[in-house]
Image (tube, rainbow, N blue to C red):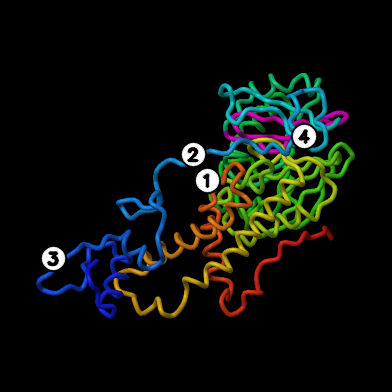
Amino acid sequence: MLKKTKSIFIPMLISSVVTGCVTHEHISEKQQPSEITPEMAINKLFGPFPPEAQVPTGFQRHEPVHSVNPPDPSIPTQALSKWEKLKPGYQADVPEWPEEVGKYYIQRLTDNTWWLYSDVFAMTLYVGEKEALIIDMPEFVHMDELFENIDDILNGKPITTLVYSHPHADHIGKSQEFVAYQKAKGIDVRVVGSEATVREIKRYNQPVAVPTDVLPTGRATFEFDSKEFVYATMSDWAHTGADAYIITPDKVLHVVDIFYSNRLPLHDYSGVQNMNGWIEIMRHLAGEENWNVANIGHVNVAHRKGLIRSLEYTKDIYDTWFKVAPKYWSRDILVHGQGYVGALLRNLFDKISYEVALELKPKWGHLPHWSLAHDHAMKVQWELFLNYRFIDHPEIRPSFEPIKPE
């Protein structure tokens, strides 16, 4: 190992981390220069990364992520049935990926409610005394295929009401086509959303059916089939700017891209835009006691156990972050500000996220999607980094306690 002069080497080392350029150790004229790679600089600054986390480009890991964990065995599975109701606490026996494009997997949940799953998108169908209601109309739906699969359930009753869970195109992208399809049969469709739904549709100029029944933001209700449905928009910004959850009279919850029952969250927490808002809507869901099974929009049905586990996992990320982050953040880092600050922050955030995920592995590493734990930890970085005095006031942090409906 070549001898280094600390006062000269450290600034040059940090410059290597920040800019990715080649620098050299401080050496005597008789010694040959030795290249300091970005990986070596990161090792010096933060301690060693595992070999698999180091890539020649200096970019974040970019090889494919593999799902290595088997399904969670703690949730029992019931054979898929269009007519036999799902047992309490069970999930449906459906594959991770459809056996063929356009194939429908349908499970009866209650006397009145069915789970419709096709092309990894799920809708909820509620059949009343004289008419039916459907929640969401995903972008891959083909109208003839849909009705071919549910005509026997409808038994001649028209679908007169379409309800939106949230205004993302992958879940409501075929709403205009659905309304026109029903109109051609002489059926005027009522479209239910919130004030926030309308705002977000206008914000993104979405070519979807605009709600005809606009509910106030907050915990609202609407009537269908002479029964009351809960429609709650409890966060101003979480996964979207208009995330709603719907609870049917027979205690089926429909909420999309918020939590997962038999696995950890998706990459980037399903594209959550604001983690504080996501925690808030989760706390409201935990406080709602009038639901037994949930349609979560993708993959299998879910239960309260999965909701509570998602909250617990996220709380563990936050608590671990508050422990890890202060080790790497101080005024001392500012004196090494050669080059560009963006690269230094990326390296800093990568290191913290990796260490947070590593600490959580003994408790959570057995579940599907554990391979995305670094992404989950990275998602909370800016939220905590910018909004909390995590060094001086670590006791100030988000609450994860359920919020009872008012």
- As drawn, the residue found furthest toward the front would be 1
Neighbours of disc 3 within 10 Å: few (<14), some (14-19), many (20+): few
Neighbours of disc 1 within 10 Å: few (<14), some (14-19), many (20+): some
Neighbours of disc 2 within 10 Å: few (<14), some (14-19), many (20+): few
What percent of the width, then of the height, locates residue 70? 60, 36
Query: For the point 54% across and 55% down, which residue is it?
Result: 357
Q: What residue is shown with label 1?
A: 371
Q: Which of 363 and 312 lies nearest the eye of the viewer?
A: 363
Query: Three-letter amino acid code at disc 2?
Result: His
Say left or right for 406 vs 397: right
Circle number at residue 66: 2
Mark 2 → mark 1, Cα distance in angstroms: 7 Å
Contact flag, marks 1 and 4 (Cβ < 8 Å): no
What percent of the width, then of the height, locates residue 118? 63, 28
Query: For the point 80% across and 56% down, which residue is it?
Result: 287
Q: Which of 36 and 173 lies nearest the eye of the viewer?
A: 36
Mark 3 → mark 1, Cα distance in angstroms: 42 Å
Query: Three-letter amino acid code at disc 1?
Result: Ser
User: Can I make out residue 24 in this image?
Assistant: yes
- Magenta stretch: give its range: 112-139
Mark 4 → mark 2, Cα distance in angstroms: 27 Å
Q: Is residue 279 magenta?
A: no
Q: What residue is shown with label 4?
A: 90
Neighbours of disc 4 within 10 Å: few (<14), some (14-19), many (20+): some
Q: What residue is shown with label 3?
A: 32
Mark 1 → mark 4, Cα distance in angstroms: 25 Å
Mark 3 → mark 4, Cα distance in angstroms: 68 Å
Contact flag, marks 2 and 1 (Cβ < 8 Å): yes
Element under label 4? loop
Mark nearest the camera among 3 and 4 is 3
